[in-house]
């Protein structure tokens, strides 16, 4: 009998701890939602809600350009070209320097395609080893990525991005349009907060239903 009472008491104690932990997470999530403008992230950009205005942030990945290895004339030409590009652009332009996973996805995809058609056991083993090494490198190491971004209303953001890409091409920076991993990296570094990162990956990117449920729960509290 005493054993049953003790077990019941322990279960109640665990239940209270879990309840407090859940209440703490809901409170942290509410604090995030109160000041965090980010509503969603996908391969097309970062979606924001500022007051009653819907805004979208899109951007480009810039190729690295070490001007210290160039002659003085080339340096001056590059700086002038970039300055002229910004003079022609309308609206605010943002620059971000972010540490991101090494970009090996295209290499892994190519090797995966080769693996599907390769018949030789020896070659298949070598291809798998290469894929494993690349996946390990992506998880272990970071590289510095250079981003330039614009932010505007959904109906005009594509036009702004097109103009930005055109000007960056003219400046010799050879940009590529950002993807979802780039946008994830920008948001993660912007906040540098474990709770935000947890919320972002579980709600903004992975499961929109979780995000909506959290909002409904907060409204009901």
Image (tube, grey):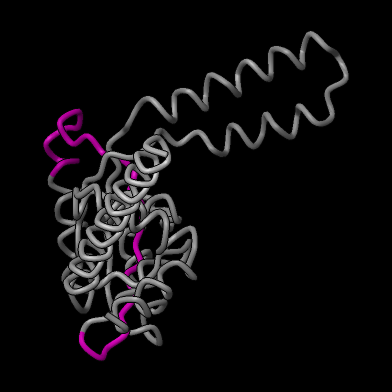
The image shows residue 187 at horizontal and vertical percentages of 28, 56
Specify whether residue 49 is in view. yes
Above or below, comparing residue 87 to residue 206 in the picture: below
Residue nearer the viewer, 56 or 89: 56
Specify whether residue 173 is in view. no
Magenta segment, which residues?
51-75
Residue under the point 53% across and 19% down: 133
Residue found at the far top of this picture: 122
Which quadrant of the view contains residue 93? Answer: bottom left
Residue nearer the viewer, 168 or 15: 15
Residue nearer the viewer, 154 or 132: 132
The image shows residue 111 at horizontal and vertical percentages of 67, 29
Residue nearer the viewer, 215 or 87: 215
Above or below, comparing residue 108 to residue 185 in the picture: above
The image shows residue 127 at horizontal and vertical percentages of 69, 19
Residue under the point 40% across and 87% down: 155
Q: The N terminus is located in which quarter? A: top left
**Residue 61: within the magenta?**
yes
Which quadrant of the view contains residue 148? Answer: bottom left
The image shows residue 178 at horizontal and vertical percentages of 41, 56
Q: The C terminus is located in which quarter? A: bottom left
Above or below, comparing residue 218 to residue 63 in the picture: below
């Amino acid at each position: 009998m005493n054993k049953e009472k003790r077990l019941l008491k322990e279960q109640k104690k665990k239940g209270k701890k879990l309840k407090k932990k859940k209440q703490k997470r809901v409170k942290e999530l509410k604090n995030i939602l109160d000041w965090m403008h980010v509503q969603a992230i996908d391969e097309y950009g970062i979606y924001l809600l500022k007051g009653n205005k819907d805004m979208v942030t899109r951007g480009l990945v810039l190729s690295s350009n070490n001007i210290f290895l160039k002659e003085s004339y080339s340096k001056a030409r590059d700086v002038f070209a970039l300055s002229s590009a910004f003079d022609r652009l309308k609206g605010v332009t943002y620059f971000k320097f972010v540490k991101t996973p090494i970009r090996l996805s295209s290499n892994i995809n190519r090797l995966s395609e080769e693996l599907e058609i390769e018949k030789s056991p020896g070659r298949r083993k070598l291809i798998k080893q290469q894929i494993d090494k690349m996946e390990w490198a992506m998880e272990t190491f970071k590289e510095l990525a250079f981003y330039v971004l614009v932010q505007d209303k959904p109906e005009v953001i594509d036009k702004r991005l097109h103009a930005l890409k055109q000007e960056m091409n003219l400046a010799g920076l050879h940009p590529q349009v950002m993807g979802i991993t780039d946008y994830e990296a920008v948001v993660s570094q912007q906040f540098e907060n474990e709770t935000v990162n947890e919320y972002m990956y579980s709600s903004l990117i992975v499961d929109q239903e979780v995000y909506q449920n959290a909002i409904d729960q907060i409204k009901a509290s």
